[in-house]
Amino acid sequence: MFDWITALIDQLGLPGVALMMFLENVFPPIPSELIMPLAGFNAAQGRMGLVGVILAGTLGSLAGAVLWYLLGRAVGTARLRRLAARHGRWLTVTPGELDRADAWFDRHGGVAVFLGRLVPTVRTLISIPAGLSEMPLGRFLAWSGLGTLIWTTLLALAGYLLEDAYHRVEGWVNPVSTVVVLGIVGLYLWRVATWGRRG
């Protein structure tokens, strides 16, 4: 995967950075923790401008987030509520919990989207509840754009400053990603196992 990402960025330049960051949001196994530091390294070598790298990464990532937001909006809370009524154990949510979550997201959704865009794995997932709760697109873009800009800037700067040691960034961020994924899976399994006791 590393060779493929490197070749694509070398061939396409800034559009390649944007494309990779879009795909990173659609197919999370493609790591932004590798894409942006590599692009930052290229900027340090004079092959790209650092500001251009950050903007391309931000726009590509934001486009991927909007795709998931639109998917959540298309599904909608009414359809999800019907699914929860029939298959609540496997979705690990009841219609009442969905209503409470929707009300919470109406109050705190902007901050949740902003913070979610700064956390590996959650970065992709946070767009779905934003769409489900029908957060206004402009508000979603503002909060998601701000979080995404900070994330891509930090990663690009790390690659720019570390130069040929940029690959170390992935080594620092990967353990966090692993903990987040394990936490999400563990929470899901716990909710399935305790469904009857909670219901």
Image (tube, rainbow, N blue to C red):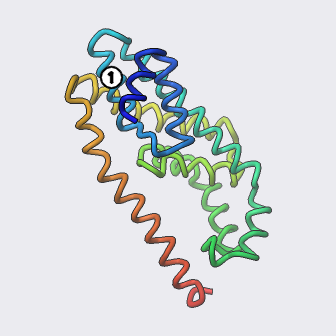
Where residue 52 sits, quadrant-wise, is top left
Residue 49: where, in percent of width, then height? Answer: 38, 12
| Quadrant in the picture for the N terminus | top left
Q: Quadrant of residue 164?
A: top left
**Residue occupying the point 41% across, 65% down:** 183
Binning the other alpha carbons within 10 Å of mark 1 as few (below 14), some (14 to 19) or many (20 upward) gives: many
- 102 or 131, which lies in front? 131
Q: Is residue 41 above or below residue 20?
A: above
Residue furthest to the top in view is: 46
Seen in the picture, residue 128 relative to 41 is either above or below; the reply is below
Q: Position of residue 110 (x, y in %)?
A: 56, 46
Left or right for 167, reference 61: left
Secondary structure of the residue carrying tag 1 is helix
Tell me where residue 104 appears, x and y as whole percent. Answer: 61, 61
**Where does the C terminus fall, quadrant-wise?**
bottom right
State the residue position of label 1. Answer: 40
In this view, 127 is above or below 104: above
Residue at image x 54%, y 28%? 60
* Residue appearing at x 53%, y 85% in the figure: 194
For the question of whether residue 153 can be seen, the reply is no
Between 91 and 93, the residue placed more toward the observer is 91
